[in-house]
Image (cartoon, rainbow, N blue to C red):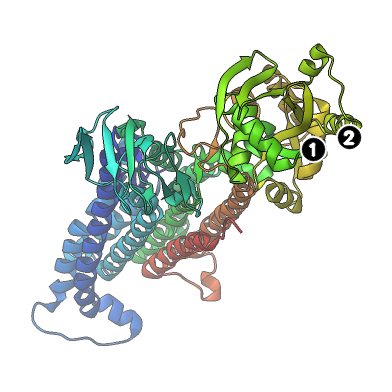
Amino acid sequence: MDHSQMDHGGSTGSATDASSVPELVEGHEHGHMDHVAMFRRRFWVSLILTIPTLVFSTGLQDILNLSGPRFPGSEWIPAVFGLAIFVYGGRTFLIDGWWELRHRQPGMMLLISLAIVVAFAYSAAVTLGLHGMDFWWELATLITIMLLGHWIEMAAVMSAGDALGELATLIPDVADVVHGDHTMSMPVSRIAVDDVVLVRPGGSVPVDGEVTDGDSDVNESLLTGESAAVAKSVGSEVVAGSVNGSGALTIRVTRVGDDTALAGVMKLVAEAQASKSGAQLLADRAAGWLFYIAVGAAIITGGVWYLIMPGDPNFVLERVVTVLVIACPHALGLAIPLVAQISTSLGARHGILVRSRAALEDARLVSIVLFDKTGTLTEGRQGVDSVVTVGGTTEDELLQLAAAAETKSEHPIARAIVDESGTRKLRKLRVAKFTSLAGRGVEAIVEGEAITVAAPRVLTERGIQMDPLLVHATRDAAIDGKTVVYVLRDDAVLGLIALVDVFRPESVEAVAKLRARGVRVAMLTGDSHEVANWVGARLGIDEIFSEVLPAEKSQVVERLQAGGAKVAMVGDGVNDAPALARADVGIAIGAGTNVAIESAGIILASSDPRGVADILKLSRATYRKMVQNLLWGAGYNVVGIPLAAGVLFGAGILLAPAVGAILMSASTIVVALNAQLLRRLRLGS
């Protein structure tokens, strides 16, 4: 990126180094707002000064065959106003052009500076007595149009980064901190870990924390991209920036400042906007090459036309100036950064956090998406799939007894049974004498009866025979890879409960979306073949890698890559780090409260796997816009430089410097508007 864009354009460098959310936002907002205001102010002042410069310019009047107003001393107006425009309007280009020259990083600003310095020096010489036609009007229009282009660029870049500011506004300035039986307002910046805060209905959550009292629905949409409110109760985690619903929540603070999820999201967006992709690096190199091409073309143009028209130095200089003006790589320099800014901000609005622009760019090439099963396609917990009873016991009765016996157990199977009982709104039964059977189940006295919830081995140990109906049900469950537990009253088997991994409700649609795009979908799991095949059949996945140890996951990625596939690995980031790093594109899912996953290039803040299809869609749309802008920016120079040099002079086609400036600025506007069209991309549909 050229120096002007480093200073004025919005790499988010100041934001990246911020140590807190307020500083992050302040650096982002003030940097862009100051430069937008500066270019706007300089443009309007220069435009006002340009009007009399054009009106009183005899050279322009001669070209247009017009006669303008005349009075004593009017011949000096173009020079006076042109000088003011050069000093005031051209100052920013001259400063940045000098920076590029000193650091041997030639680019757009050096070309602009060279053009306006040549035009100024020649015009001043003509005004002081050198024979020829001055370029004051051309100098004025060039600087004014360039300022307009930069103003449009800065305004567009600032608009592209608005997501950071929107996130920051979610944090309240003060919070209600609980002290004993009363609360007091305190600045959020003074809140510490383990403080307790009260979030009233409709209020914003000021910090990350854990709910210690209360129930409510919390809107986390701007952070995770999920529109539906999330139910929160005692033990639930909440994140700073989310909006409380109708219930009051008491929250114990677990993270503040830089450690909050919101601060992590903002840093990721800032880092992504400051990073460079392959297309950006190509554009940077092209801008550097264009400097040498432009200077070389200007030298050749000057030499050739001097040989052809040695008696008309004004015409020769005009051609040189026009070449330098039209060669300015303004559109080329804007082509990639603006698209990247918009795409990362657009992704953030939909819960897609881009840590690496290169990862987003590469996602368009993905031919296979490899999902880790647990925590990605499934919720990482078990749920009740079916209940089979014998001896006249109903399903609800069996669940009531099992849930009562399991109430005090923390085992995942116990939690699944208790949750199912709660979902069915079954009455809670009285429990006494709870006993855990290590690795085999639990026993308890429920409503005065001995109830056991046990694994199959308990029945074998006790020599208990099962009803044939339960035998067949057990066999069918085993084929499907389900987990089975039995419910006994004394030594009589009342029935069985079959449990399975709970699918994320969006998983089937996520797989279908990817396959509709022509992308292969595969699943990776450490579960048995039976379980993996059953899950794959339910989700529509037929390419399955099962019984894979965590350390072997990256080897699966390597095997797929060896076959020529571009692999996107999707995991929850817990034990998937090697595979995420090895994949062509690593996507961490379910990171709403843990966005700092270093092994992934892209992070889905929500737990919705449908976001993977959105990533590919965003990648393809982003790359398409980048290519369009690069072709326009480079194509404009390929055609414009020869025309400016006068290769079609014999055909009556000759570009004046002012026309070159207008065309150059027009190309910048086209690139900016084309990038803005990316905002129309619909994600999540």
Pointer 1: residues within 10 angstroms few (<14), some, or many (20+)?
Answer: some
Left or right: where does residue 535 sit relative to residue 592?
right
Q: Quadrant of the N terminus?
A: top left
Identify the mark nearer the N-term, 1 or 2.
1
Query: Is 342 in front, or is 514?
Result: 514
Instruction: Give the quadrant of residue 395.
Output: top right
Residue occupying image coordinates x 75% and y 25%: 527
Q: What amino acid is labelled 2 in the image?
A: Leu
The reply to whether residue 546 is in sight is no
Instruction: Give the quadrant of residue 55.
Output: bottom left
Question: Percent position (x, y) of residue 516?
Answer: 75, 53
Question: Percent position (x, y) of residue 580?
Answer: 61, 29
Determine whether 614 is above or below 56 in the image. above
Marks 1 and 2 sit apart, C-alpha to C-alpha, by: 8 Å
Helix, strand or loop at label 1? It is strand
Pointer 2: residues within 10 angstroms few (<14), some, or many (20+)?
Answer: few
Question: Percent position (x, y) of residue 309?
Answer: 43, 64
Residue occupying image coordinates x 36% and y 38%: 213
Q: What amino acid is labelled 1 in the image?
A: Val
Query: Is 333 in front, or is 99?
Result: 333
Q: Which residue is mark 2?
A: 469
Left or right: where does residue 224 sit relative to residue 427?
left
Q: Which mark is residue 77?
A: none
The reply to whether residue 458 is in sight is yes
Query: Is 86 in front, or is 320?
Result: 86
**Residue ranking furthest to the left:** 72
Left or right: where does residue 582 sit relative to residue 662?
right
Contact between labelled residues 2 and 1, with CB atoms less than 8 Å apart: yes
Q: Which residue is mark 1?
A: 388
Determine whether 75 is above or below 240 in the image. below
